[in-house]
Amino acid sequence: MEKVQITLDAARHNAGYSQKEAAARLGIHYQTLASWERDSSNLGLATIERLSQLYQIPKAVLFFGKKNDFIRSLRERATRD
């Protein structure tokens, strides 16, 4: 069974936050959050913890990496199934 993960922007949407609302709660600029949503491969553990808490989702469910890589892996998985 494959591990189910979602992107940071999907987690934010599911939690009901706009980018600006989530960024304000995190104490960062919304463009910083937009950058993280595109590529979260270099986030530190403290930031990962804050995102997990804000979105109320386990860290293991969040995908950390480049969003394009996530989309590519979904497409590849769909063609295998």
Image (cartoon, grey):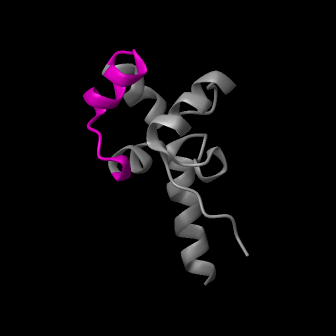
What secondary structure is the stretch in magenta mostly built from?
Answer: helix
Which residues fall within the magenta stretch?
14-29
| Residue, far right | 1
Find residue 63 and report its horizontal and vertical position in percent. 59, 47
Q: Is residue 14 above or below residue 2?
A: above
Find residue 11 and report its horizontal and vertical position in percent. 43, 48
- Write the residue at 34% across / 16% down: 29
- Number of on-image labels: 0
Q: Is 24 included in the stretch rendered in magenta?
A: yes
Res 34 → quadrant: top left
Q: Is 37 included in the stretch rendered in magenta?
A: no
| Residue, far bottom | 81
Res 79 → quadrant: bottom right
Quadrant where the image shows the N terminus: bottom right
- Write the residue at 36% across / 23% down: 25
Find residue 9 and report its horizontal and vertical position in percent. 40, 44
Nearest to the observer: residue 11 or residue 39: 11
Find residue 14 and report its horizontal and vertical position in percent. 36, 53
